[in-house]
Amino acid sequence: MQAGFDTIGLIGKLNHEGATESLSAIHAYLKKRGCRILVEERVAKELDESELEVLDLVSIGREADLAIVVGGDGNMLGAARVLSRFNVGVVGVNRGNLGFLTDIHPDNIETELDDIFAGNYQTEQRFLLEVEVYRHDQLKSNNAAINEAVLHHGKVAHMMEFEVYIDDHFVFSQRSDGLIVATPTGSTAYSLSGGGPIITPNLDTLCLVPMFPHTLSSRPIVVDANSMVRLVVSPDNSEALQVSCDGHVVLSVLPGDEIRIRKNPYTLRLIHPKSYNYFNVLRTKLGWGSKLY
């Protein structure tokens, strides 16, 4: 039994020797299983194979039952923002650095995939953010984020002024370098570096983390993920600002603009190996101590 995974999308990191090795190994494994293999356009250039079925990421999302992403968390985030729209299962092979979202070690590819195809895996839904920039009440730009949306200056060490509202309730005004609005998935990413809390992914919350605020009383705050977060940029700011989605997509923000952040209607369907344990991931990736007894 193949757990309903008959058509497999193969997505990966480019210009990385280890990633190319893993992509080739996975492609050979899937051919041996008799799967229909959909190869992302950029990956096809790395594979020394003929007669590949080459598709773009959107087409893979429409047709695949499972997508295998080879690379680091950045590769996973880029693919997942698209694939989440199609509810395709996504599993990651870690060829990056930390790899909070890429569970499979390159040395264990066949063993872990054998289990997944046999139906021995865990499924987890992670919510995304919808990030919108409004100017004079008109939508100017929008995108999705899995980890976080960050309001920041285009220049280093430049402060800005803005107000924060939760469900139309005024929360605070601030002079700072910006604000991070993170999901539980993103709580171990940029938010963690900014002093935010680690939030287990089963919690339905958002975390707001101020970036270098010009006050001693400012602290991160955790709110209901079903809230609407509005950031109103002061018209007194002298220069253009930005909102970054997962550090990949940048939306331009002008003084006086409003950023609205809420849950995206889609979710990311992560497929984990049967041995996956979130706290084991934290211990391994963050270097926490092991059991004493």
Image (spheres, rainbow, N blue to C red):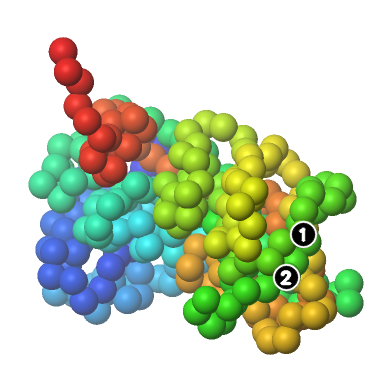
* Quarter of the figure that contains the N terminus: top left
Disc 1 crowd, CA 10 A, few/some/many (<14, 14-19, 20+): some
Q: Kindly identify the residue that appears in the image at 50 percent across and 63 percent down.
A: 246
- Which residue position holds label 1? 173
Residue 260 visible in the picture: no
Q: Kindly identify the residue that appears in the image at 30 percent across and 59 percent down.
A: 72
Q: Pick the residue in front: 195 or 259.
A: 195
Report x, y in % for residue 71.
27, 60
Report x, y in % for residue 174.
71, 62
- Left or right position of 28 against 124: left
- Left or right position of 56 against 144: left
Q: Kindly identify the residue that appears in the image at 17 percent across and 18 percent down.
A: 292
Q: Pick the residue in front: 237 or 223.
A: 237
Q: Which image quadrant for residue 240?
A: bottom right
Disc 2 crowd, CA 10 A, few/some/many (<14, 14-19, 20+): some
Give the residue type at disc 1. Answer: Ser
Give the residue type at disc 2. Answer: Glu
Q: Which image quadrant for residue 163?
A: bottom right
Q: Which image quadrant for residue 42?
A: bottom left
Q: Earlier in the sequence, mark 2 or mark 1?
A: 2
Q: In the rendered structure, find residue 10 and report the number of the disc placed on it.
A: none
Q: Kindly identify the residue that appears in the image at 56 percent across and 81 percent down.
A: 154
* Quarter of the figure that contains the C terminus: top left
Query: In the image as oriented, which residue stretches furthest toward the bottom?
Result: 239
Q: Looking at the picture, does residue 201 appear above or below residue 171?
A: above
Instruction: Check disc 1 and report its element: helix, strand or loop.
Output: strand
Report x, y in % for residue 176.
63, 66
- Left or right position of 264 against 20: right
Marks 2 and 1 close (CB-CB < 8 Å): yes
- Left or right position of 110 against 83: left
Q: Looking at the picture, does residue 106 appear above or below residue 56?
A: above
- Which residue position holds label 2? 161
